[in-house]
Image (cartoon, helix red, strand yellow):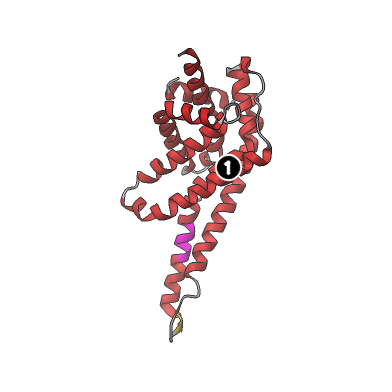
């Protein structure tokens, strides 16, 4: 299955009744994750630059203190922007099953129910990917300012892999998931880049995780069906 075919199928289903519940759930969960991640990271930035003191001098005051306050504000805004990626990664664990089930019922009805995993396992995977997103993005921040397309590539790989793995592991073993991921690696990354771009667009970032999961569910089944024919 080509990436364009997967995108077209996903877009056609986004407005259907079957996708309404996971879409609404995704809106609420993603919004909460964005607020939580942004507030946490922003508070951390503000704390780092507040109450700065110099040995034998004490806390900085006056214009320097005002500058640090301004820096904290700007840092908090930047932190909120970069919080969208870990927020999206965290959110997918909450609604992978409703999204994948809606996609499979419409496009792959012969499969039957997936074995699935516990809700706690799904959420735990999402939180682990969120942590990985934070660890990847923090050291890359200076390079992002030098090369603006870099965040979409880094976060595209991360979000693409997270969404693909979450969709595939409902039915496959980790080893089989890894093999299938390799077979569609380039398409997965390109789809992830699209998803990363959507996470930076206001309002669209709220539905980006649902869109990404549906898209990667199609890519997973495309790889699975191709493997079965070989």
Which SS class for mark 1?
helix
Residue 76 horizontal/vertical position (percent): 49, 59
What residue did someone put label 1 on?
A: 126
For residue 185, which quarter of the picture?
A: top left
Instruction: Magenta stretch: give its range.
Output: 72-77
Residue situated furthest bottom in the rendering: 56
Q: Which residue is painted at 48% across and 13% down in the image?
A: 229
Q: Which residue is painted at 42% across and 21% down in the image?
A: 2
In the rendered view of the protein, which quadrant contains the C terminus?
top left
Residue situated furthest front in the rendering: 175
Question: In the rendered image of this protein, does residue 209 appear above or below residue 40?
Answer: above
Q: Verify whether residue 76 appears in magenta.
A: yes
**What type of secondary structure mainly makes up the magenta span?**
helix
For residue 93, which quarter of the picture?
A: top right
Residue 88 horizontal/vertical position (percent): 54, 43
Residue situated furthest top in the rendering: 229
* Circle 1 residues within 10 Å: few <14, some 14–19, many ≥20: many
Q: In this orientation, does residue 84 appear? A: no
Residue 118 horizontal/vertical position (percent): 68, 36
Number of marks in picture: 1
Question: In the rendered image of this protein, does residue 229 appear above or below residue 17?
Answer: above
For residue 94, which quarter of the picture?
A: top right
Q: In this orientation, does residue 65 appear? A: yes
In this rendered view, identify the residue nearer to me: 217 or 60.
Answer: 217
Q: Which residue is painted at 52% across and 47% down in the image?
A: 86
Residue 32 horizontal/vertical position (percent): 62, 48
In this rendered view, identify the residue nearer to me: 84 or 159.
Answer: 159
In the rendered view of the protein, which quadrant contains the N terminus?
top left
Q: Verify whether residue 114 appears in magenta.
A: no
Q: Which residue is painted at 48% across and 36% down in the image?
A: 161
């Amino acid at each position: 299955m080509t990436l364009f075919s997967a995108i077209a199928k996903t877009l056609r289903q986004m407005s259907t009744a079957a996708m309404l519940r996971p879409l609404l759930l995704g809106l609420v969960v993603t919004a909460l994750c964005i607020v939580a991640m942004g507030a946490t990271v922003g508070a951390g930035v503000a704390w780092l630059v507040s109450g700065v003191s110099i040995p034998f001098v004490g806390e900085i005051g006056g214009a320097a203190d005002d500058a640090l306050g301004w820096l904290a504000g700007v840092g908090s805004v930047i932190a909120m922007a970069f919080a969208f990626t870990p927020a999206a990664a965290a959110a997918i664990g909450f609604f992978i099953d409703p999204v994948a089930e809606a996609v499979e019922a419409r496009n792959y009805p012969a499969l039957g129910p997936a074995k699935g995993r516990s809700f706690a396992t799904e959420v735990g995977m999402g939180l682990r990917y969120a942590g990985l997103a934070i660890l990847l993005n923090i050291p890359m921040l200076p390079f992002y300012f030098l090369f603006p397309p870099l965040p979409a590539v880094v976060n595209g790989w991360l979000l693409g892999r997270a969404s693909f793995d979450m969709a595939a592991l409902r039915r496959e073993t980790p080893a089989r998931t890894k093999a299938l991921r390799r077979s569609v690696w380039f398409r997965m990354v390109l789809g992830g880049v699209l998803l990363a771009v959507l996470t930076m667009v206001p309002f669209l970032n709220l539905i980006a995780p649902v869109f990404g999961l549906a898209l990667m569910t199609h890519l997973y089944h495309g790889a699975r069906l191709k493997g079965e024919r070989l």
